[in-house]
Image (cartoon, rainbow, N blue to C red):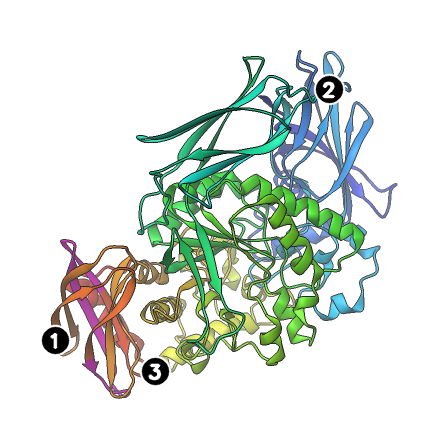
């Protein structure tokens, strides 16, 4: 296949859609790109849309319609030429030389048109007309049930297949725009080619290569396919005749190199060369990459905390999942790609072995999944629905079926993807309104069917969190084996967190203030301080209604830990980052010491997609908060951690999330008194958490304990904050200094 890029500079014209005779704007536009960014670049909007309240000005252009246009020279080849749009946001009509090619209404997936007989010699003109999503939405009647069951930010996003967060979320501003946000290309394809091709690895010793061949004359006589798979010194080969356009061939693989998550084994990836022969002549050759691994999700519909489960098995081994929710890297998706490589390095550096691609965002491109394949990062992939009661009209179901089918087929060869999840929190939205989520035909009928017909061996979860019939009948959510732990977001050691019955926590977070250096980049000088009654702080806490609830949440969490709130910005930021860091550490280590009843946590979240005060542990400008270092230590494949006080003592655990036994020596001391509370050798079994000692402690103690251990020839450190709140912030700062002098590192 030959691919010709149509990216670059296009013309862009726009006008108010509700007033066709209004003044027309004429600009240039970069593709991939977004209209709002072009308006900013060319002076119609502020240069820095993220400074102060500037983002609110994007609303002035929500009701505009736009025309993208460019010319290109037709290729010499005129057969099997396709015009491909990888991502168009969102309501689009497509034209070539004035002739309409078709329409689309989905930003998440590509659209393509066979233009073989429509190209002319020399210059050709392609035009894309984008209608306003808000004008379209306002023209529709929304069922009252959809309004009543939707998230607080309104039901607008249920009508169009656009990222839900663009209409405003508690982690993103309202930024409704449109554009050609992914590549535009001409593709000249082989006349005989693979329409579908992937490997079924449910039996690692006997692979199945599944295929569908596209052949214009349907002539399969004397046609063969050949498959060569290579990974290091492991190689497999087959060549078989084709008897029908689709089928599979089995490939014996007696000693496969398995793909494993990080810390559990190697990330072995096979390169496959796929060939089609017709009458002995090679007519098509493609390459693909895949990993050989099995995945199983063991889950119960309800739990009491022990008689239930929610855990992933990879190659038969339980994986202790530790990682982050993944959200779009920028409020304007066309510039997220340039941020991806740096963000993924943070994923690796902080020690994640799982990412949950959140349903309020978009489906990431192959660069994301390739990195996860290569680095052993498991991916929990939500379908793009979040927190709304989506109305299953025939039009919606047809559009969404096409989307889901494309997504599954496009990404199913990535071994890192271990789960398709129906949506984010739609079950809970329904259940909280007294509606049985099992009546949701989108996630109970359409999506299971799509996954069944287009994937093999990968689990499907109806919603995150999933509310089963049995759980719904209890009238509450405390019995769910997988949960999102938000609650009141009060004391991070409150009973809500401490006594959660969930085996797997797929969301939990805690606020942390960005550094002053970062705040100065997005808050105007006159609004830097104080934060009270401050409209810019409110907007950059991603509140969509102008109240200060999320700003004051951060203050409350500081007051909870330290008993008072600092009056200077530097001390306030420090106190906020400490409260966040200790909370994340507690959430992660609580799950790790809870094995075998606990099996994973996906905390919220690694990196901001716009500048804000939030739960992210790295701000939009890549500045790390203190929580980053705490999480990095807590997620190491082997750590020593201390459980909470019970019956006058705290148990000490060796948490070993590897497949090899660990032995070593541990020492725990009080940094104030230098008293050694534990000094012992330990043996920690593989892939479990083992009690290796106990510490006599009181609830009234206020101690900072340093944990030092040696394992595999390395000396490592952790700490434990002992006692009940509040703590003195200056004393805590002194404890951190002592921790660093002892040998530990904060960042």
Left or right: 450 with respect to 566?
right
Q: Is residue 705 magenta?
A: yes
Q: Which mark is residue 674?
A: 1
Q: Residues within 10 Å of mark 2 (few under 14, many from 20)?
A: some
Q: Residue at x 22, y 84 (%)?
A: 697
Q: Does label 2 or label 3 sit earlier along the sequence?
A: 2
In three-dimensional space, the C-alpha distance between marks 1 and 2, rounded to whole angstroms, equals 79 Å
Residue on which the image places disc 3: 726
Marks 2 and 3 sit apart, C-alpha to C-alpha, by 72 Å
437 shown above or below 349: below
Q: Position of residue 638 (x, y in %)?
A: 25, 59
The one of 447 and 426 positioned closer to us in this rendering: 447
Label annotation for residue 116: 2
Name the secondary structure under disc 3.
loop
Image location of residue 163, percent across then percent down:
64, 52
Q: Is residue 9 magenta?
A: no
- Disc assigned to residue 689: none
- Of badges 1 and 2, nearer the viewer stands 2
Q: Residues within 10 Å of mark 3 (few under 14, many from 20)?
A: some
State which quadrant residue 94 falls in: top right
Q: Quadrant of residue 76?
A: top right
Q: Position of residue 341 (x, y in %)?
A: 43, 41
Extent of the magenta region: 695-717
Decide which of 126, 423 is in the foreground and name it.
423
Residues tagged 3 and 1 counted as in contact (Cβ below 8 A): no
Secondary structure, mark 1, is loop
């Amino acid at each position: 296949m030959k691919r010709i890029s149509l990216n670059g500079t296009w013309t862009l014209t726009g006008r108010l859609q509700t007033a066709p005779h209004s003044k027309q704007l004429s600009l240039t536009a970069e593709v991939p790109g977004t209209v709002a960014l072009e308006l900013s670049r060319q002076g119609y909007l502020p240069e820095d849309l993220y400074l102060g309240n500037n983002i609110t000005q994007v609303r002035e252009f929500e009701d505009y319609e736009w025309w993208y246009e460019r010319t290109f020279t037709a290729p010499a080849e005129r057969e099997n030429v396709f015009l491909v749009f990888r991502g168009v946001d969102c309501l689009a009509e497509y034209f070539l030389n004035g002739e309409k090619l078709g329409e689309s209404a989905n930003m998440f997936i590509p659209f393509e048109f066979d233009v073989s007989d429509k190209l002319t010699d020399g210059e050709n003109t392609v035009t894309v007309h984008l209608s306003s999503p808000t004008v379209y939405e306002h023209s529709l009647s929304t069922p009252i049930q959809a309004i009543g069951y939707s998230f607080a930010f309104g039901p607008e996003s249920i009508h169009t297949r656009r990222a839900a967060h663009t209409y405003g979320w508690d982690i993103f501003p309202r930024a409704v725009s449109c554009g050609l946000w992914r590549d535009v290309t001409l593709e000249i394809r082989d006349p005989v080619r693979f329409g579908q091709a992937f490997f079924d690895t449910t039996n690692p010793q006997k692979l199945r290569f599944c295929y569908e061949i596209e052949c214009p004359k349907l002539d399969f006589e004397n046609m063969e396919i050949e498959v060569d798979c290579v990974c290091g010194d492991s190689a497999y080969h087959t060549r078989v005749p084709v008897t029908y356009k689709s089928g599979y061939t089995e490939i014996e693989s007696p000693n496969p190199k398995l793909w494993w998550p990080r810390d559990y084994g190697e990330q072995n990836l096979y390169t496959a060369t796929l060939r089609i022969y017709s009458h002995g002549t090679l007519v098509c050759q493609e390459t693909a990459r895949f990993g050989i691994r099995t995945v199983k999700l063991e889950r119960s519909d309800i739990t009491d905390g022990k008689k239930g489960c929610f855990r992933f098995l990879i190659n038969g081994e339980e994986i202790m999942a530790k990682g982050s929710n993944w959200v779009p890297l920028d409020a304007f998706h066309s510039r997220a790609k340039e941020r991806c490589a740096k963000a993924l390095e943070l994923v690796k550096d902080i020690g994640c072995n799982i990412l949950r691609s959140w349903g309020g965002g978009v489906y990431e491109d192959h660069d994301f999944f390739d990195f996860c394949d290569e680095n052993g990062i498991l991916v929990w992939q939500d379908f793009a629905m979040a927190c709304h009661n989506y109305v299953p009209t025939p039009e919606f179901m047809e559009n969404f079926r096409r989307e889901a089918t494309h997504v599954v087929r496009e990404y199913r060869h990535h071994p890192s993807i271990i789960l398709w999840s129906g949506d984010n929190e739609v079950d809970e939205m329904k259940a909280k309104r007294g509606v049985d989520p099992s009546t949701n035909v989108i996630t109970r009928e359409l999506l299971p069917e799509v996954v069944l017909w287009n994937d093999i061996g990968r689990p499907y979860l109806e919603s995150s969190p999933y509310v089963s019939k049995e759980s719904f009948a209890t009238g509450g959510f405390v019995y769910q084996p997988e949960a999102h732990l938000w609650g009141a977001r009060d004391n991070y050691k409150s009973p809500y967190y401490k006594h959660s019955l969930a085996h797997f926590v797929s969301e939990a977070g805690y606020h942390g203030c960005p550094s002053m250096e970062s705040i100065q980049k997005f808050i105007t000088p006159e609004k830097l301080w104080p934060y009270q009654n401050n409209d810019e702080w409110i907007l950059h806490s991603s509140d969509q209604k102008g109240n200060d609830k999320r700003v004051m949440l951060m203050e409350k969490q500081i007051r909870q830990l330290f008993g008072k709130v600092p009056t200077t910005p530097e001390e306030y930021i420090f106190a906020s980052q400490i409260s966040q860091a200790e909370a994340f550490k507690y959430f992660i280590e609580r799950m790790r010491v809870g094995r075998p009843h606990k099996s994973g946590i996906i905390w919220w979240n690694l990196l901001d997609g716009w500048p804000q005060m939030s739960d992210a542990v790295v701000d939009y400008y890549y500045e790390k908060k203190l929580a980053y270092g705490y999480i990095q230590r807590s997620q190491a494949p082997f750590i020593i951690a201390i459980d909470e006080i019970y019956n006058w003592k705290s148990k000490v655990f060796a948490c070993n999330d590897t497949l090899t036994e660990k032995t070593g020596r541990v020492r725990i001391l009080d940094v104030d008194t230098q008293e050694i509370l534990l000094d012992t050798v330990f043996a920690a079994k593989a892939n479990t958490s083992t009690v290796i000692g106990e510490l006599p402690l009181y609830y009234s103690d206020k101690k900072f304990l340093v944990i030092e251990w040696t394992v595999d020839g390395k000396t490592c450190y952790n700490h434990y904050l002992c006692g009940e709140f509040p703590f003195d912030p200056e004393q805590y700062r002194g404890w951190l200094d002592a921790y660093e002098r002892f040998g530990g590192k904060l960042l």
